[in-house]
Image (cartoon, rainbow, N blue to C red):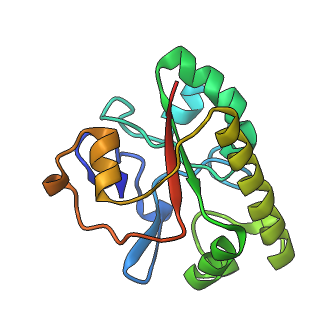
Amino acid sequence: MLEALPGFNTTDRTPERTYEHHAYTGHVGAYFGRGMEFPAELDLDTIDSAWTDPAAGTQIVKSHDWAYKLNEIRAVAKENGDWIMLVYRPDLASQAWWHEAGGFQIKYPNYGVYRDHAGMLAEIVAQNKAILKFGRDVLARWDYFDASWIAAKFGIPINDIPDITPWDDILVSVIKI
């Protein structure tokens, strides 16, 4: 949803990097991590290689595996003036949504590294724990993802923000290092 706003770089999108379900386009653009096209490495050349034009705007570098590297990301973000966006959804709600979206039948990104349903739930729990711990460590302020949050965080007039379905169980935080 953020990438639909002015100033965001979407040159990482290809048909192979798209998975649509329901009325919501769930996965578009490059994902980094285990079993993915790009490893979850904090190397600018690796990250930039996912975009055909790395300078075309703000890149949203997406990975479930970033949850395990948040302190490293904080150090790199501090050097480069980057922001960190955290997204949190409770464990069982995350698992239920993943199943509704297609579970292991999802074509992109690759969830094969999680092996089975128990492995997926274990990863969700571990990733959420890491996200919440990091959020506590940096005194993150959590908010609901909606148009007013986007307007406040990104300075975009609320009338310029597309309609967003607010989710009662998704919290977000932007960490400006």
Residue 48 in percent (x, y) is at 49, 32
Residue 144 in percent (x, y) is at 45, 59
Residue 172 in percent (x, y) is at 50, 52
| The quarter of the displayed image where residue 102 is located | bottom right
Residue visible at 30% across and 43% down?
152
Side (left or right) of 110 relative to 126: left
Residue visible at 31% across and 40% down?
154
Pick whichever, 22 or 108, lies toward us.
22
Pick whichever, 98 or 87, lies toward us.
87
Pick whichever, 26 or 16, lies toward us.
26
Query: Above or below — where is 164 with respect to 135?
Result: below
| The quarter of the displayed image where residue 100 is located | bottom right
Side (left or right) of 165 relative to 76: left
Residue visible at 66% across and 67% down?
90
Residue 84 in percent (x, y) is at 53, 36
Query: Above or below — where is 40 with respect to 117?
Result: above
| The quarter of the displayed image where residue 28 is located | bottom left
Whether residue 42 appears in this view of the structure is no
Whether residue 173 appears in this view of the structure is yes
Side (left or right) of 55 relative to 144: left
Pick whichever, 41 or 175, lies toward us.
175
Query: Above or below — where is 64 with respect to 140?
Result: below
Quadrant in the picture for the N terminus: bottom left
